[in-house]
Image (tube, rainbow, N blue to C red):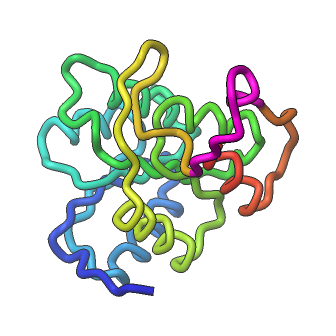
């Protein structure tokens, strides 16, 4: 795996749980990141994005008053969004299939299940760097291209097939859903 110098990046970590923010921040510092902004909800995160140039965001789903889903949609679609193209990693304990698909459809770049390890977070960051996806603006969707695989065999309605919701997806199942 390629080693990257992350020392010049500014990262925004938004999570209502102080312990999880600390864990994420310590992992990021271990990668060499020095500029880390922490907030405890999506509204404060959006405000911070207006005051600082942020290179990528890590946010939780469950925050109040603005959760990670609505924060992502706001970043991607608001007319006053400071950076609708910023990579957003949804880091959450809510790994049900419907939530993974909602996060993807809101415009998240990557999805990562808690508890997080340094290795899995590093892989997601490397994926953002080494495999950037085109940014799409279309009716009903704004964000990185949702499909990672190019499958010419899919056509029409089959292209948008959705798995039945279930609880507790494995990391492999989350990856598969994000690649649709």
Numbered disc total: 0
**Rendering coords of residue 158 (x, y %):** 75, 28
Residue at the top extreme? Answer: 139
In the rendered image, the vertical position of residue 57 relative to residue 121, given as above or below: above
**In the picture, residue 161 is in which quadrant?**
top right
**Rendering coords of residue 42 (x, y %):** 40, 35
Q: Is residue 151 magenta?
A: yes
In the image: residue 101, left or right of residue 52:
right
Span colored in magenta = 149-161
Main SS, magenta residues: loop
Q: Is residue 28 magenta?
A: no
The residue under the point 73% across, 21% down is 157
**Rendering coords of residue 100 (x, y %):** 66, 41
The residue under the point 41% across, 45% down is 40
**Rendering coords of residue 131 (x, y %):** 41, 61
In the rendered image, the vertical position of residue 98 relative to residue 33, given as above or below: above
In the rendered image, the vertical position of residue 105 relative to residue 140, given as above or below: below
The residue under the point 25% across, 75% down is 6
Front-lying residue, 166 or 51: 166
Quadrant for the C terminus in the image: top right
In the rendered image, the vertical position of residue 97 relative to residue 30, given as above or below: above
Quadrant for the N terminus in the image: bottom left
The residue under the point 29% across, 45% down is 86
Front-lying residue, 180 or 125: 180
Front-lying residue, 15 or 136: 136
In the image: residue 156, left or right of residue 90:
right
**In the picture, residue 56 is in which quadrant?**
bottom left
């Amino acid at each position: 795996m390629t080693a990257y110098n992350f020392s010049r990046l500014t990262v925004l970590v938004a999570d209502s749980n102080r312990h999880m923010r600390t864990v994420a921040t310590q992992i990021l510092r271990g990668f060499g990141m020095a500029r880390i902004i922490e907030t405890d909800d999506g509204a404060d995160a959006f405000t911070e994005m207006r005051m600082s140039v942020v290179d990528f965001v890590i946010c939780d789903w469950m925050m109040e008053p603005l959760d990670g889903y609505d924060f992502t949609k706001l970043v991607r679609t608001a007319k006053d969004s400071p950076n609708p193209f910023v990579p957003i990693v949804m880091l959450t304990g809510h790994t049900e299939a419907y939530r993974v698909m909602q996060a993807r459809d809101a415009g998240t770049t990557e999805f990562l299940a808690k508890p997080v390890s340094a290795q899995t977070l590093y892989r997601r960051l490397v994926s953002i760097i080494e495999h950037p996806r085109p940014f799409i603006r279309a009716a009903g969707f704004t964000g990185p291209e949702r499909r990672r695989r190019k499958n010419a065999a899919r056509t029409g309605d089959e292209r948008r097939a959705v798995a039945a919701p279930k609880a507790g997806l494995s990391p492999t199942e989350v990856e598969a859903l994000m690649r649709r």
